[in-house]
Image: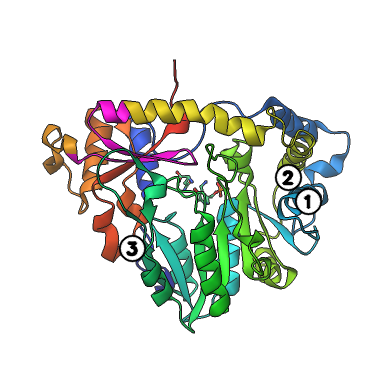
């Protein structure tokens, strides 16, 4: 293994997907829906593949299929109240994963520091390290420890945040709505970060894949819409999350042309281009939702409404069995403190270093319920902060 990958070889997904294949638990681990995506989007893919235009099954434009970049630019031009150029300010990638990878690879030189807010979607750290960057971590911590805890009660310390910015800081990776907590960053929290980014002239990479799964009255705020922030922000989205088609692996990034240029260079020298018929289908999906925008039957609105019932069911279920869930304001994950159950489980049967790994493995094998150990979403020095919790994906729960 080349030196730059040493120490980056462990993946909670590789391990837990294998565990699920082996033990066949109720799998509330990896996040994906277990129901059908909207029929119009699935039909659009069939139509693209069977289309009389043979070119819809051939290579398309490298930085994004024209119909898709046009649709993405149209949607976000509306949401940002700014005209995005589909050819230079949007790039289509193999899932949000590749957009993150291209943004980090394309903007990191050895020694550059990136700020990561914990818990964090686990790939941020290896992506930064393998690019030669240095991650600097700051945890969100619950500001309450009794009663009903909301994801909004998990906060970062402002002094600590300010202390991480310096002249070596290349940028900060923001994830709102947040995986795994479901936190929707408030205007105040985003402005504080935006002001620091401007003061220190840094980038913001904003991972917003859960932008359409926000529970009222909470509202998703795009940091790129804050004053003078578009110029320094790369925003990332996912068709998998937007249209409930995680197996399609199409994502995108948008932002100013000078910043997106670097992502194009990484993309053209790695994947070069993404699947044409899938991009065509996602484009059709966007065009149709844009026509329904703001109406109750628009998928951007209806998905969160369907999820709300599952969220409340899951929260009650977890509380009834003795866990203490954090109620998410968005997304399809729920983090719960499981330590009240410690007397009922035999953690000694598992060998892992961290207790949440032992708990989730024991539960998978003995109770048939799989969750994800949140310590996977913390840096080595802060893993203890995740050990008392478990993450469940509640989009798969069936409410009757
Ligand atoms: N960011 C976050 C916060 C995620 O939870 C995920 C997983 N869906 C991704 C990025 C990657 O998304 P995709 O499946 O589109 O690559
Ligand atoms: N984002 C999903 C999750 O957090 C999927 C992760 C993955 O595929 N690596 O569960």
Q: Given contact means CB atoms under 8 Å apart, are the residues at marks 3 and 1 in contact?
A: no
At 34% across and 38% down in the image, what residue appears? Answer: 371
Q: Earlier in the sequence, mark 3 or mark 1?
A: 1
| C-alpha distance separating marks 3 and 1 | 37 Å
- Coordinates of residue 51 in the picture (x, y in percent): 84, 33
Q: Residues within 10 Å of mark 1 (few under 14, many from 20)?
A: many
Residue depicted at 36% across the width and 64% down the height? 157
Residue drawn at 56 percent across, 59 percent down: 206
Q: Are marks 2 and 3 in contact (CB under 8 Å)?
A: no
Q: Magenta region: which residues?
A: 317-339
Residue at mark 1 to residue at mark 2: CA–CA distance:
6 Å
Which label was assigned to residue 54? none
Of the 4 image quadrants, the one containing the C terminus is top left
Closer to the camera in the image, 60 or 282: 282
Taking the image as drawn, is residue 270 in sight?
no
At mark 3, the secondary structure is loop
Q: Is mark 1 within 8 Å of ligand 1?
A: no
> 113 left or right of 323?
right
Up-down relation of residue 170 to residue 391 (above or below) = below
Q: Is residue 193 left or right of residue 139?
A: right
Q: CA distance from mark 2 to mark 3?
A: 35 Å
Does the magenta run of residues contain 331? yes
Marks 1 and 2: CB-CB under 8 Å?
A: yes
Q: Which residue is mark 3?
A: 379
Which image quadrant is residue 219 in?
top right
Residue located beneath label 2 in the image = 279
Comparing labels 3 and 1, the label whose residue is closer to the camera: 3
Q: What residue is disc 1 on?
A: 65
Q: Which-is-in-front pick, marks 2 and 3?
A: 3
Q: Secondary structure at mark 2?
A: helix
Position of 154 relative to 30 (above/below):
below
């Amino acid at each position: 293994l080349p030196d730059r990958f040493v120490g980056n070889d462990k993946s909670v997904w590789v391990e837990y997907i294998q565990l699920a294949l082996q033990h066949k638990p109720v799998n509330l681990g990896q996040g994906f829906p277990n129901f059908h995506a909207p029929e119009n989007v699935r039909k659009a893919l069939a139509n693209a593949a069977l289309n009389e235009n043979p070119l819809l099954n051939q290579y398309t434009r490298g930085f994004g299929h024209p119909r898709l970049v046009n649709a993405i630019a149209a949607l976000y031009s509306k949401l940002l109240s700014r005209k995005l150029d589909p050819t230079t300010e949007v790039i289509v990638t193999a899932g949000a994963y590749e957009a993150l990878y291209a943004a980090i690879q394309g903007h990191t030189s050895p020694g550059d520091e990136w700020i990561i807010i914990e818990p964090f979607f686990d790939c941020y750290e290896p992506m930064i390290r393998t690019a030669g960057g240095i991650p600097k971590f700051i945890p969100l911590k619950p500001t309450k420890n009794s009663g009903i805890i909301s994801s909004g009660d998990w906060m970062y310390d402002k002094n600590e945040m300010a202390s991480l910015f310096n002249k070596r800081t290349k940028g900060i990776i923001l994830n709102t709505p947040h995986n795994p907590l479901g936190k929707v960053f408030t205007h105040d929290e985003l402005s504080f970060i935006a002001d620091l980014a401007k003061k220190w002239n840094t980038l913001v990479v904003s991972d917003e894949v859960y932008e359409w799964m926000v529970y009222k009255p909470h509202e998703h705020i795009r940091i790129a819409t804050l004053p003078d922030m578009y110029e320094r922000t790369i925003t990332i989205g996912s068709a998998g999350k937007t249209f409930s088609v995680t197996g399609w692996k199409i994502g995108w990034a948008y932002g100013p042309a000078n910043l997106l240029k670097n992502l194009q260079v990484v993309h053209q020298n790695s994947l070069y281009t993404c699947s044409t018929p899938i991009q065509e289908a996602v484009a059709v999906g966007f065009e149709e939702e844009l026509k329904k925008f703001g109406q109750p039957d628009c998928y951007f609105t209806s998905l969160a409404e369907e999820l709300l019932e599952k969220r409340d069911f899951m929260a009650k279920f977890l509380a009834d069995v003795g866990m203490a869930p954090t109620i998410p304001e968005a997304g399809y994950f729920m983090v719960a403190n499981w330590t009240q159950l410690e007397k009922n489980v035999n953690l000694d049967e598992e060998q892992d270093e961290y207790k949440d790994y032992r708990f989730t493995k024991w539960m998978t094998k003995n109770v048939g319920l799989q969750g994800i150990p949140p310590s996977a979403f913390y840096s080595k020095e802060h893993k203890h902060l995740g050990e008392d919790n478990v993450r469940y994906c509640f989009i798969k729960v069936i409410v009757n």
